[in-house]
Image (cartoon, rainbow, N blue to C red):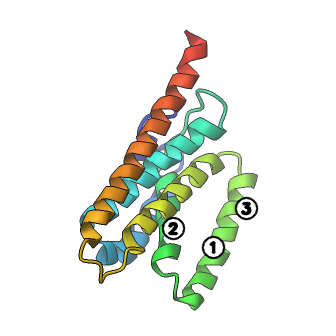
Amino acid sequence: MAADPSAFAHSTSSLLHLAMNMYGVYIFGTMLEPRMGRLRFTWLYLLSAFGGSLGILLLSAPLSATLGASGALAGLFLATFVVFRSNKQALRSMGIILALNVALGFFVQSISWQGHLGGAILGILAACCIVLIPRSNPQRARIQILLLTALSVALLTGIYVSTEAVKWPLG
């Protein structure tokens, strides 16, 4: 079923795709983790990964099977837009890459645009929970944790409700 942790499995039919996903996680990880911290970065990654699964549950045919970390990578990619929002030159370059990835997702059959979209949305939301709280706020860490917890509960609830909706007609 699509709600499984598919971001932690990958098809062996395309080792190049696996290598590119891992390289992307490395690149965005080296950019984001120093700014967010290890715990928040890990939380961002996991929310994006499971957001990809939710995107598949909501937007794909019932019982669609997918594999790969692409949804998590899409979340990291879009989170980078939030974190580096004041760097216009970097945003322009990343915008071109984003446009190419969106186009590929619709034209290449084996790419799950639904997983990319779900991961991207959760990545943006998680990044906002982390970086948009002013550093001057003495309650910053607490607010971040509360927002990320609320987002996690909403995501897990969405996954649960979606999987129950898929299972119910099947008996």
Which of the two residues, 150 or 115, is positioned nearer the viewer here? 150
Q: Please name the amino acid that badge 3 sits on.
A: Ala
| Cα–Cα gap, marks 1 and 3 | 10 Å
Give residue 69's position: percent from left, percent from top: 46, 52
* Residue at the image point whose x is 42% and y is 39% from the top: 156
Image-based side of 90 in relation to 98, left or right: left
* Residue drawn at point x = 31 percent, y = 81 percent: 135
Which of label 1 and label 2 is nearer to you?
A: 2
Q: Which residue is mark 2?
A: 77
Q: Residue at x 33, y 51 (%)?
A: 149
For label 3, the residue is 103
Q: Is residue 87 left or right of residue 126?
A: right
- At mark 1, the secondary structure is helix
Please tell me which of labels 1 and 2 falls first in the chain.
2
Residue 32 pos. (x, y %): 38, 73
Along the line of sight, the residue nearer the viewer: 152 or 150: 150
Going by the numbered disc 1, the residue's amino acid type is Ile
Tell me which label, 3 or 2, sits earlier in the chain: 2
Return the residue nearer the eye: 166 or 155. Answer: 155
Q: Is residue 42 above or below residue 170?
A: below
Q: Is residue 68 above or below residue 85?
A: above
Residue that numbered label 1 is attached to: 97
Residue contact at pointers 1 and 2, CB within 8 angstroms: yes
Query: Looking at the rendered structure, which numbered label has been put on residue 74?
Result: none
**Mark 2 Cα-neighbour bin, 10 Å: few <14, some 14–19, many ≥20:** many
Q: Which of the two residues, 150 or 159, is positioned nearer the viewer here?
A: 150
Pair 3/2: label in front: 2
User: Which image quadrant: the C terminus?
Assistant: top right
Three-letter residue code for mark 2: Phe
